[in-house]
Amino acid sequence: MDLLHTPTSMAKRPCPFPSSPSSPPPNPNKLPNMNNQVGNLLQTFLNLADSHSLSIDQSLEHLLDSSPCDADQSLLIDRALKLGSLLLEAGNRSARKRSSVHNSLTWALPPDLTIKLFSMLDAQSLCYAAATCSMFYKCAMDPLCYANIDLTTVVPKVNNAVVSTMIQRAGKALRHVDLRQTLVSVSLNCPLIERLFFESSKTGRDDSLKSSTCVDLVNNCPNLTSLALRGFKLYDYKLRILVKGFCKLKYVDFSTSYSITGSFLRNLGGDMGGSLLEVLIFRDCMHLKELEVARLFASVLAGDFRFLRYLDISNREGLAAAGDSYGRCYSLSIIPTKQVLEERPDICLLAEFPSEGSFVDLGQMTDSDLTSEVSLSSQLSSRASDGLSFMCTSEINYSSDQTSGNEEG
């Protein structure tokens, strides 16, 4: 235990390296010899681990008693604590390195297949895998693991910072996002995104989607082919910005969104935008007008929306009647449904309404009923076309319905 002895005089303590800039640096030829001495000394300390802890405690107490100066005793205790901390840190670091090497040797998959496997995990499982070892951490940090972000399930402590971090990790590899928030982060960081599902928990009352965000999404994410915005208070002019701006758009779902009358569909489906639309879902859009649906069908008969294959205008309260702000209609009397189905048998039309005067509580509908249409997006193939920057100018100059809360451009 003489190895732990420290002189009582603070001024006479040996200094292994010069503290003055003017002092000569240590001789490099002596460093290997010094490393050997430290290694031998460390081996001596490690051999003490086989001794009983009581003997080590007694030896330290004896060393403290042999130093009558209180300052020297405090210094010895600080050095013992520091040495123990350094040994513990070095031991943990070495254990992690050995575990990582062991995992890399015993793990059956190469890094590229491991990354592919991790890319199929949900966000929470991916975080658990990253915390396992350094090898898994490196694989879990690959941008491909965040190409498809799904945060619609119940994951604890998911906030804007978490979502933004995952988007930044994905970088240009991001292709698909299922979110409940942070549309601004998507528009700023995801230029290659193709599918976006965004649902607000404030069904019909969330007015957080601003016109500027719609314009940013169109300008910065030109490859979007599938767009679902559910539960927002969406005005028709905002939807017109989105549907007309995304030149590759094929799938839209605006279910349970408030204030939509359907007027944004006017003059779409052809050269004015929306020509590639294959799926239109307006389920339970309370202000969707019977007259606008009739105009949509007339456009289909006129040759627009040539690629349309699926249309859902079902409403648990019926469509808004023409000319009556509070009237509801529960049939398709003025809509040329039969003619459309005869001329376009390739279109699947879903129009489920309650009997007149009845009301179906949305809470009685199952989750599968509300989300069954979302799976259609995975069946849509992408078409290549040049990106086009879209500016918000006079696109909003069309009539709006004041009763539904629509704003003038």
Image (spheres, helix red, strand yellow):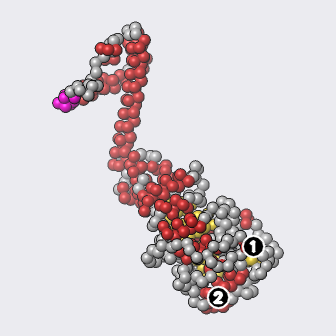
Determine the secondary structure under disc 2: helix
Say left or right for 261 vs 75.
right
Instruction: Give the residue at x 73% y 87%.
Output: 334
* Residue wearing tag 2: 298
The C terminus lies in quadrant: bottom right
In the visual, does 65 lie left or right of 352? left
- 169, above or below 317, in the image: above
Q: Nearer the viewer, residue 221 or 338?
A: 221
- Secondary structure beneath label 1: helix
**Magenta-drawn segment:** 25-32
Q: Is residue 56 visible?
A: no
Q: Nearer the viewer, mark 2 or mark 1?
A: 1
What residue type is disc 2 on? Ala
Q: Along the polypeptide, which appears first: circle 2 or circle 1?
A: 2
The residue that appears at 38% across and 25% down in the rendered structure is: 83
Name the residue nearer the viewer: 277 or 184.
Answer: 184
- The quadrant in which the N terminus is found is top left
